[in-house]
Amino acid sequence: MTVSICVAGATGWTGRAVAEGVLASDDMTLASAVSRSAAGQDLGTAWGGDANGVPIFGAVGEALEGVDVLIDYTSHDAVLDHTLTAIRNGVSVVVGSSGLGADQFAEIESAAIENDVAVVAAGNFSITAALAQAAVLLAAKHLPSWEIIDYASASKPDAPSGTARELAERLAEIRPPRVDVPIADTAGDVEARGTTVADSQVHSVRLPGFSVATETVFGLPDERLTIRHDAGSSAAPYVGGTLLAARVVTARRGLTRGLDSLLLE
């Protein structure tokens, strides 16, 4: 069975790499793309090459005819509307954009169940990042104290990253971390302890020279364990996991959080 795909954000950094992956696959077809800045153009032309027959639309609602799966790599302020629009049109969604919180995911899950479709969302679709997350969740079952450090470039507008937020929310499903001094009782500037996301302390670093990295630090007396994932400077690490999710999402229902959930099935 060939899966018909629409990529929102297909002229962007990750979206283009994913769209190229769809075009190169044997079991998917790229039916349409979404990009407000290139609406009305052919996708290949918008990329600066030859036409490839993929139309670009300015809005998700215009691009879903004949589409099985929407893959969204847009922005934190657009992804919720795009996802709900696809769901209401009976289209399953793979969410690669960051910036969604627990309340928004609850809304997405309710809509997906109501419309009998599925959503797979991950803060990071890298296979190695998913394996790192699986390792963190395993460690949290045995180690009681941890904090999360989230690194990205100075230009990344959202904090914490989707990867760090998802990790904190997944850890909350296991248990809250032990904190010897309650955050509210911090002497000095409480902001120095980071932000609390689903009971975990998360510290976001935004500086030139960083790509994307997420580090979870576990501590015990006289020892510590650090589980860290670093991404490089290209979007290549995210393509394989995104396409894996797109291949299986139509057979699911409701919301699945985390690529590791698929890898461990």
Image (cartoon, grey):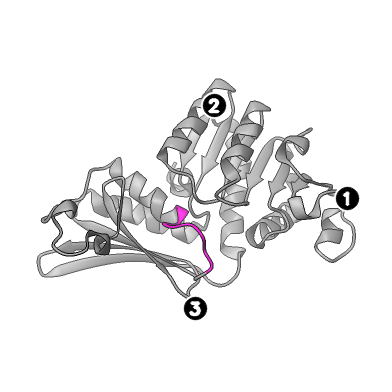
> Mark number for residue 209?
3
As measured in the structure, the alpha-carbon distance from the residue carrying label 3 to the one carrying label 1 is 38 Å
Q: Residue at 68%, 28% (x, y): give it.
A: 89
Tell me whether circle 3 and circle 1 mark residues in contact (CB < 8 Å): no
Residue 33 vs residue 201, the one in the foreground: 201
As measured in the structure, the alpha-carbon distance from the residue carrying label 3 to the one carrying label 2 is 40 Å
Q: How many residues crowd around disc 1 within 10 Å: few (fewer than 14), some, or many (20 or more)?
A: some
Disc 3 residue type?
Gly
Q: Nearer the viewer, mark 3 or mark 1?
A: 3
Tell me whether circle 3 and circle 2 mark residues in contact (CB < 8 Å): no
Residue 242 vs residue 111, the one in the foreground: 111
- Tell me which segment is drawn in magenta: 155-162
Disc 2 residue type?
Ala
Image quadrant containing the C terminus: top left
Q: Quadrant of residue 45?
A: bottom right
Q: Quadrant of residue 221?
A: bottom left
Query: Above or below — where is 187 with respect to 22?
Result: below
Residue for badge 2:
111
How far from the left and from the top, in percent, is residue 39? 81, 49
Q: Tag 3's secondary structure?
A: loop
As measured in the structure, the alpha-carbon distance from the residue carrying label 2 to the one carrying label 1 is 32 Å
Q: Nearer the viewer, mark 2 or mark 1?
A: 2
Report the side of 227 relative to 91 (left or right). left
Residue 158 vs residue 199, the one in the foreground: 158
Q: Residue at 72%, 42% (x, y): give it.
A: 5
